[in-house]
Amino acid sequence: MNILYIGPYRQKSMVGLTSLFILMNLLQNKKHKVSSRPIYLDKDPINQDIVQDIIKAEHGQYDSYDVIIQHVTLDMCVKINAVKKNIIIPINNEEILSEDDVEKLAGFDTILVDNKTIYNLYKEYYSKIANRLTTYDYDLVIPPTQLAQFDVSPFGITKKLYFIGDYQNNINNIYSLCHAFIKHSVNCSDEYSLILYLFNIDPSIKQNITNNINQIYSSYKIKYAINRIIIAPIDCNLQNIITAHNTGSVFINIGDSNSNSLNYKICNSLNKQIINFNDTDYIFEFTRNNRVTDKKCLGVSCGSIDTKINKALNNNCTDQPQPFKKQHISALI
């Protein structure tokens, strides 16, 4: 079977890394012949360090294709009528779909979804695409030689709650986490810290976050408490993400919605505790990341973040969820 895969697998972002692992899994199935073409989203840095198998797939071209897989945003997707089977893995940043979006997706044979909350939302509200929705899994192998830890002195002995994500995509979540942590940690008998591993931040952004943290302390009239929130700028690459997970104690799983996404898979493989957010923790909102958007989005409510952080600081993390996605992507083609 000849397969064409299109996705942002050359970009240094969580979506890019996910796309990379999807492609690598497809290439490992020797029953198929896979060629690939990269797309580029926003201004995410480009990863030049690509394995030879992917370079070979990019140079590969076949006279005809049986399947085309598009891991793209909805404004980029196009059904190819000349191909027998069209599959889409939509990148939509948890936006509520417009009628045009639904019509586009309805043209595809299969819609692979990488998020439990979005899967349930699509299933409930969009009858035109409900029967095309499928979840997918992929293999992720972490070589033991990659396991290391960041130096987080002087808080190395603390129990470290941690978050990993792009700053621009998580502004509201970041400030909600800081507020909840400060509010509930000052009265804890145990020693806790909060580490924010953030992509794409510069010194001015880091200073803005620090100023906001200081304002939160002041709002609670806490003058002499030690700031236990660490702002840790990191590049978005697999080594850094694995190291971040291996350094922390309790992962704050905002955005992944208990699915087998990249962060969840790494965290679970390292046997870390997880603060999980369920469908009921999400709300519809027209504002996202301090910007007004023309599309309604899903976001974790401040109240849910406050409640879950409070429970975590009292050693009451949510139970580990069962894997949401059970079918391997190679078996779905």
Image: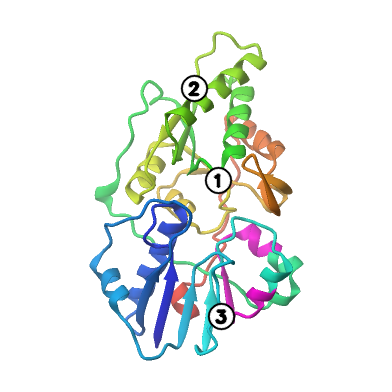
In front: label 1 or label 3: 3
CA distance separating discs 2 and 1: 23 Å
Above or below, 238 relative to 190: below
- Residue closest to the far top: 224
| Within-10-Å neighbours for mark 1: few <14, some 14–19, many 20+ | some
Q: Could you say which disc has been placed on residue 169 in the image?
A: 1
Determine whether, in the image, residue 32 is placed left or right of residue 279: left
**Which secondary structure lies at badge 1?**
loop
Please give the residue where the numbered disc 2 appears in the rendered image. Answer: 228
In front: label 3 or label 2: 3
**Which of pointers 3 and 2 lies earlier in the amino acid sequence?**
3
Instruction: Determine the residue positioned at 35% across, 51% down.
Output: 238
Can you give x and y, in whole percent of width and height, for residue 128 in the image? 73, 76
Q: Could you say which disc has been placed on residue 79 in the image?
A: 3
The amino acid sitting under disc 2 is Arg
Residues in magenta, as a range: 103-121
The amino acid sitting under disc 1 is Asn
Above or below, 1 relative to 260: below
**Which secondary structure lies at badge 3?**
loop
| Quarter residue 135 falls in | bottom right
The amino acid sitting under disc 3 is Lys
Q: Are marks 1 and 3 in contact (CB under 8 Å)?
A: no
